Amino acid sequence: MFAIEAVDLSRQFGARLAVDHLTLNVAEGEFFGFLGPNGAGKSTTIKMLVGLLRPTTGRARITGIDIWQQPLAAKQVIGVLPEGLNLYERLTGREFVRFVGTMYGLDDTQARTRTDELLVLMDLENDADKLVVDYSQGMRKKTALAAAIIHTPRVLFLDEPFEGVDAISGRAIRNVLQRLRERGTTIFFSSHILEVVERLCTRVGVIAQGRLVAEGTIDELRQLAQTGAHASLEEVFLRTVGADQANGANSGERGLAWLD
Amino acid sequence: MAGLRQQAAQYLGLDYIRIRTLLALRRKLMVRQFMRQPGQLGGIIVMLVTLGPLVLILAGMSAFVYLTAPGIWPVNVLALVLVGLWLVWIVLPLLAFRMNEGLDMERLLIYPLRSRELVASALLGTLIDWPTYFTLPFFLAILIGWFTSPAFWVVLLAAVLGYLHMMAASQLALTASTGLLRSRRFRDIAIVVASLAGSSCYFVTQGLQAAARSLGVETLQSVRPMFFLQWLPPGAGARSVELVLAGDWPQALLWLLYSLAWLAACVWAWWSLLQRVTTGVTIWQPRAAPATRKVRLASTRPSSSESLLRWLDPCTRQMFIKELRAMWRIPQRRIGALQSIISPLVLLFFFGMNGRAGGSVPSTWVSLMLPGLALFSAWSGSMNMLGMEGRGLPTLLLSPVPRRHLFTGKGLAIWLVTVTPLTILAGAFTLVARNPSAIVSWLAMLGVALAGIAVNIVAAVYLAWPFDEESTRRQNTGGGCASALGQVVLVPLAMLVAGAPILLPLSLGAFLNLQWLQTGAALASLPYGIILFVFAATQAGQLLPAREAEIIEATRWPSPR
């Protein structure tokens, strides 16, 4: 049984096909990196996998449970750090994390204790009683991550967890993710920061224009992209999505001559 | 013409192309703000229809006074008009700051623009802003009213000075309070104050009537506003007109110079402030809370308020508490909560006045008043129940909590906020009017409110639209016509039907004077309301999971805000 299964998943927005018949399996305990250029369909895929956006076709299963047939059972085992964070702006950080904990079925004592521990772990304890609306981007992200893991989910979806986060917060988040990985949590992770993906992920999927164009370990992707054994993930990624040639054409031949 | 403008700009040491670009930017921002949010254009049209005639009437009246009133009145009214416009222009931009991006000069400070260009573009930009057009009738009235006066040229000068004072002072106030205006706390307070000022019109009218009654005609005739207004910058211009009419030209010149000095000081202060703001210095910035290193220890003991709610399921309890917090902390929702307190107060005040005037309130009316108010409060308080979750809605719907708990927690919190002020009203009414029928009405109201909320719980699964927590208006909706029609027509009708088993016997009992029927309906009201509420929460809880993706889509703002 896979932790995450997406079968023939598509989503159409008007005339635009945002995700194009995507099929993907992620095994239990895997740290799966999901890469793609802006607008490639990463967030749309995650939303369909967690039950926030109904797919036009296809189905999604989390630990064998169909998210669209048994939404509440599937949601019990997942934690999500969504694209827009979706925080309650007028709750304090402490109130928010505790509220989410209770909504995932933790009893009062568990919710309180875990909230306090998570706030310390995320270095938010001094700001825990401020309203979320007054938080910086990094603080928001850490609060959302604390809320996503408070119920010890079996599968964790993270949409751009490092975007807009400073180095200190980034390190705190990375440490938490490492610990979750060690305890066997499956992590599905989208990011633009390829260095982090390279360091953390066991397997990577690349999506471009809604299609899954490559999937495998980083070494497998190197072979697939024919970049050589020591190529960085950035080179592999650019080659895979075909951006290396496009960029060269843009800067060399067309326009911006005044920059020279 | 363009060449002339270019020459004028050069003469003043300004870059013509930059000024033109800045003005074009301001115009585009204003137009696109309406294109992006057609609701705002609707608001302006409503304002034009309601405020436009009022402005025209006031301007017409001022012209009438300039032309026909005897003695000191024309020049005193001139002073009142100029000072009034000046004050309005200082306050108005502060309130419209969030609405009009063009007013935010700080955004331009990263570009290599000179202060004089910023000042010139800000002053000229006011000619593009729509509120300017509300002031034009007053200036037109001045021109018409004083055209035949021997002091016309001085009046013209005073009017031009008045206009420049208006613009400079409003920009100074805006720049000085940039830090404050950007703060979330100021926005929150401004939203609540602006909205409540509108709702408290009744009290203001009563106060003005009382003041007018206490002042006699003789008192009014002895009032000389000029005595005070002459010291204010635009009032000094009017004072110079008064002196010219009296033939005292040297003193008139002194007052004009006084006004001009004010203007120079104001522009200089604004200019200096702009330069300070460039370096990141703001004044009137709300003080940040001191950085405390005091860490709160983990507390596993529930608070006393939570202990009181032990009988509720933990999820329902947390939802209830969260909803109460949202109703207080989100300014638009706080307005709703405060208005549900103000409306009964207005009624109480009305009955109090009626009682003092020797009148009495018919008991039939009392019997129906509280349930009617409860139904209305329940309708407005529980409207768009899921959309009101704002940005947190996806988080809520990502959780596996049984959906009936969500509705129960939210519904109970709304019910509490609905019935609390009405309970106080019922108690006060029983004491003030010595009318015991309020107790029966109160009992009936408890169940009717629950029945009303039950209807909106079911409606929430089908009718949802976006709610912008950061909007400056109470109800900033992106819902379509179908949502509006459903919420304004279908839901109230369904609420009346749901309340009918209580409201009908209550009305019949009141009109036919059947005490037993009224008492029976009142006693049955709460059990009936509870049954309907539980049924609605359970049903909606079952229906919701199949509609969650669609609701999230419907409550999402179309573009990042």
Image (tube, coloured by chain):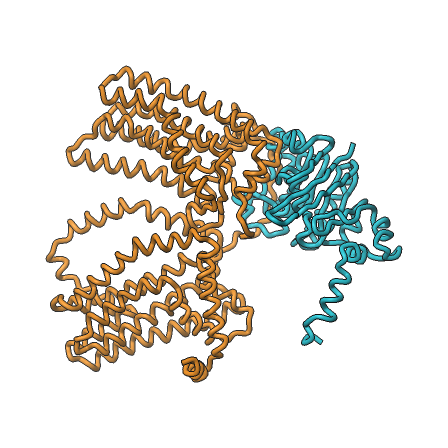
Image quadrant where one finds the N terminus of chain B: bottom left
Rendered position, B134 above or below B530: below
Q: Quadrant of residue B348?
A: top left
Residue farthest to the front?
A: A15
Q: Is residue B55 left or right of residue B295?
A: left
Q: Residue at x 28, y 39 (%)?
A: B346
Q: Position of residue A173 (x, y in %)?
A: 70, 47
Residue B7, x across and y down, in percent:
43, 84
Question: Height in image: B505 above or below B102?
Answer: above
- Asked whether the viewer can see residue B446, the reply is no
In the image, the chain rendered in orange is B
Q: Position of residue A200 (x, y in %)?
A: 78, 47
Q: Nearest the camera: A92 or B119?
A: B119
Pick the front one: A188 or B79 = A188
Measuring 37% from the left and 55% from the top, which residue is drawn there? B44
- Point out residue B459 in the picture as x, y percentages from the top left corner: 47, 32
